[in-house]
Image: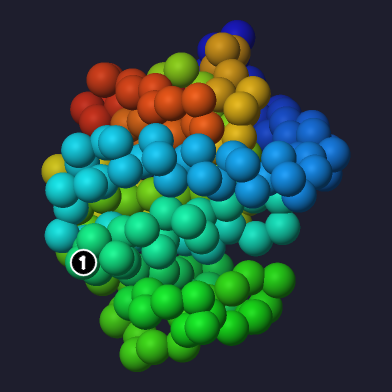
């Protein structure tokens, strides 16, 4: 099914249906499985040259049943890589601060964990060599489905043109059918799964939906 085949109202309904499906599947994941997936994702992403050789990586803190990022964040920091983490603003835009360790994180709105350091501004993501974003699903063109606030679509727009853009997902969340998409939705160049990295070569050049 092509994304363009959804009329605009139907695209939003299709997105919500897909979100409910993925969140329902995630709700059944057990803590040991989540922990094992987080370690596997760390190993996968550290094997990616765009991440392991980066000077600056923008990432996020996985919470609840999201793909875990804790092991990765600490491994990047131990390698001397500057890690930027998001701070959610009232309008769902994202500010950024440097990650200095797990003790630096505090519980914030919507159950998020956020860094407490000085705010660097929303455009700080433009300094990152690699941008790792959460998502609920990604299709084979690199189109990403998020939670609906548009926060990470804005992040991907602000990222440097040559930055590596990668979504972090659980197994089964890379889908073969095209996701319903709207004009503001942004593509990623790759997906990190516990089983490995999947790249989308055309996503760098065809980042936004043309409809």
Position of residue 58 relative to residue 122, above or below, is above
At 61% across and 35% down in the image, what residue appears?
170
- Along the horizontal axis of the image, is 116 left or right of 48? right
- Quarter of the C terminus within the rendering: top left
Query: In the figure, 41 relative to 108: above or below?
Result: above
**165 or 43: nearer the viewer:** 43
Q: Quadrant of residue 64?
A: bottom right
Q: Position of residue 168 (x, y in %)?
A: 49, 41
Badge 1 element? loop
Label 1 belongs to which residue?
80
The residue at the point 31 percent across, 43 percent down is 46
Identify the residue at the far top of this view.
Answer: 1
- Classify mark 1: residues with Cα within 10 Å, few (<14), some (14-19) or many (20+): few
Q: Nearer the viewer, residue 91 or 167?
A: 167
Judged left or right of residue 25, residue 56 is left
Task: Identify the residue shown where x is 76% and y is 49%.
Answer: 31
Instruction: Judge left or right: residue 85 versus residue 49.
Output: right
Q: Residue at x 33, y 23 (%)?
A: 199
In the picture provided, is 119 more to the left or to the right than 94?
left
């Amino acid at each position: 099914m092509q994304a363009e085949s959804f009329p605009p109202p139907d695209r939003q309904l299709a997105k919500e249906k897909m979100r409910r499906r993925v969140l329902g599947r995630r709700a059944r994941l057990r803590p040991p499985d989540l922990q094992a997936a987080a370690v596997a994702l760390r190993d996968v992403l550290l094997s990616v040259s765009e991440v392991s050789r980066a000077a600056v990586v923008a990432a996020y803190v996985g919470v609840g049943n999201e793909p875990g990022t804790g092991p990765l964040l600490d491994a990047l920091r131990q390698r001397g890589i500057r890690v930027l983490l998001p701070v959610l603003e009232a309008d769902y835009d994202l500010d950024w601060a440097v990650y200095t360790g797990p003790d630096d994180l505090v519980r914030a709105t919507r159950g998020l964990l956020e860094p407490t350091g000085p705010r660097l501004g929303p455009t700080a993501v433009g300094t990152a060599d690699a941008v790792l974003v959460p998502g609920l699903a990604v299709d084979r063109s690199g189109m990403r489905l998020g939670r609906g606030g548009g926060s990470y679509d804005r992040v991907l727009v602000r990222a440097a043109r040559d930055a590596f853009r990668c979504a972090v997902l659980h197994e089964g969340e890379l889908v073969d059918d095209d996701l319903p998409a709207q004009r503001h939705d942004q593509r990623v160049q790759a997906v990190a799964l516990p089983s490995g990295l999947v790249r989308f070569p055309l996503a760098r050049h065809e980042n936004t939906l043309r409809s």
